[in-house]
Image (spheres, rainbow, N blue to C red):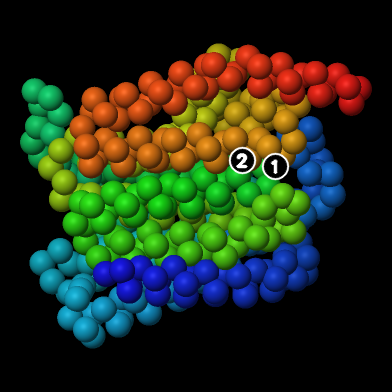
């Protein structure tokens, strides 16, 4: 398994790293350029935003190669009882649908509801292929979900995580780095859980492709990931989190991925609540604002790089909490969380006070 993990990561990394410069050139030719036209933008010059295809191609090259080789070796049976061939084809067609919709969004821009329709269609294809959250086990409540609720829950999860990664994509390297951290956390959980090899290959290939793209995306960025990239990342994380722990008959089926993806999920939920309160209507949810966590850190005087690194640390803490919760017990995980919170509380006041003083000196 570890050899497959190494191959999946390196092949995806090299492919994405080599292809990214080409996507920068293509972006300029087709007009996939992010122009800073409002105060929400953190950059002050036009920036290519077509990095997604490099990540997708790197991911697909690695995943397809490993599926073929492991199947030949007899380590994976995609035609077996789990019917992974159908699930993988559904996943692939979902990626194609989502990428086409987001391509037009990157080039010309489309209405948010049109993009949501594309996300729902992509999620629907995956669910129709057999990828579903079907079992739950909570205190005093366990059993199989009925078909309707299973479909609704799964589609809600896929669309929700897809948008969570998309919404947190606001600073150089932010969504890419946080997604890599989430991939590593889920990979550790999958390995400890004895999850299907296919889920381990997918999550590793995604981590590799993102790592190959990150050098071009970290501050100061040479290119952005674009809607194609951010939607693909969220979509893939959502689907693989179901595949990876679908056989775990515990509350971990949903709880662990939620914790591992805690930062983007929290940012998305807070954005929904914030926009509902301010806009006082459902329509307000789709209106972009400048109230995300990264915006608040920038307003506090942090540089882009400092804000991104701080959010990376928070994401690592979420991932570690998920791993500890899975491997040990809830008391050990909670004690770890309390220690992290205590350290943050001790240093919070002085840390932000220092940033405010630095900002005043600059003014």
> In screen coordinates, is 77 left or right of 322?
left
Q: Which residue is mark 2?
A: 309
> In screen coordinates, is 338 left or right of 304?
left
Q: CA distance from mark 2 to mark 1?
A: 6 Å
- Mark 1: secondary structure: helix
Residue at the spot 44% in from the left edge and 26% down from the top edge: 340
Q: Quadrant of the C terminus?
A: top right
> In screen coordinates, is 55 left or right of 89?
right
* Residue 269 in view, yes or no: yes
Q: Nearer the viewer, residue 314 or 70?
A: 314
- Mark 2: secondary structure: helix
Q: Is residue 293 above or below residue 237?
A: above
Q: Quadrant of the N terminus?
A: bottom left
Residue 266 image offset from top left, x and y in percent: 47, 29
Give the quadrant of residue 212: bottom right
Residue at the spot 15% in from the left edge and 29% down from the top edge: 138
Q: Nearer the viewer, residue 225 or 153?
A: 225
Q: Are marks 2 and 1 in contact (CB under 8 Å)?
A: yes
């Amino acid at each position: 398994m570890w050899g497959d993990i190494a191959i999946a990561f390196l092949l995806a990394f090299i492919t994405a790293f080599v292809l990214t410069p080409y996507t920068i050139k293509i972006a300029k030719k087709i007009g996939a350029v992010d122009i800073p036209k409002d105060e929400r933008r953190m950059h002050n010059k036009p920036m290519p935003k077509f990095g997604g295809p490099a990540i997708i191609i790197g991911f697909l090259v690695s995943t397809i190669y490993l599926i073929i080789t492991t199947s030949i070796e007899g380590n994976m049976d995609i035609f077996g009882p789990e019917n992974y061939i159908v699930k993988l084809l559904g996943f692939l067609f979902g990626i194609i649908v989502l990428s086409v919709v987001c391509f037009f969004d990157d080039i010309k821009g489309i209405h948010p509801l049109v993009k949501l329709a594309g996300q729902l269609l992509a999620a629907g294809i995956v669910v129709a292929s057999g990828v579903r959250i079907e079992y739950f086990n909570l205190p005093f409540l366990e059993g199989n979900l009925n078909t309707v609720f299973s479909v609704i829950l799964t589609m809600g999860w896929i669309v929700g995580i897809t948008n969570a990664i998309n919404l947190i994509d606001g600073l150089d390297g932010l969504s890419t780095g946080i997604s890599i951290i989430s991939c590593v956390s889920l990979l550790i959980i999958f390995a400890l859980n004895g999850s299907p090899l296919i889920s381990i290959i997918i999550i590793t290939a995604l981590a590799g492709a993102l790592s190959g793209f990150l050098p071009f995306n970290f501050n100061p960025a040479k290119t952005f990931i674009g809607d194609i990239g951010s939607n693909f990342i969220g979509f893939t994380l959502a689907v693989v989190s179901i595949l990876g722990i679908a056989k775990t008959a515990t509350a971990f089926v949903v709880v662990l991925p939620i914790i591992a993806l805690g930062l983007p999920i929290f940012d998305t939920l807070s954005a929904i609540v914030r926009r509902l309160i301010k806009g006082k209507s459902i329509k307000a949810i789709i209106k972009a604002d400048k109230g995300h966590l990264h915006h608040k850190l920038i307003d506090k005087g942090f540089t882009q790089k400092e804000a991104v690194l701080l959010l990376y640390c928070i994401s690592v803490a979420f991932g570690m909490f998920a791993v500890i919760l899975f491997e040990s017990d809830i008391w050990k995980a909670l004690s770890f969380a309390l220690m992290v919170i205590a350290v943050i509380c001790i240093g919070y006041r002085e840390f932000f006070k220092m940033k405010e003083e630095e900002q005043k000196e600059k003014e």
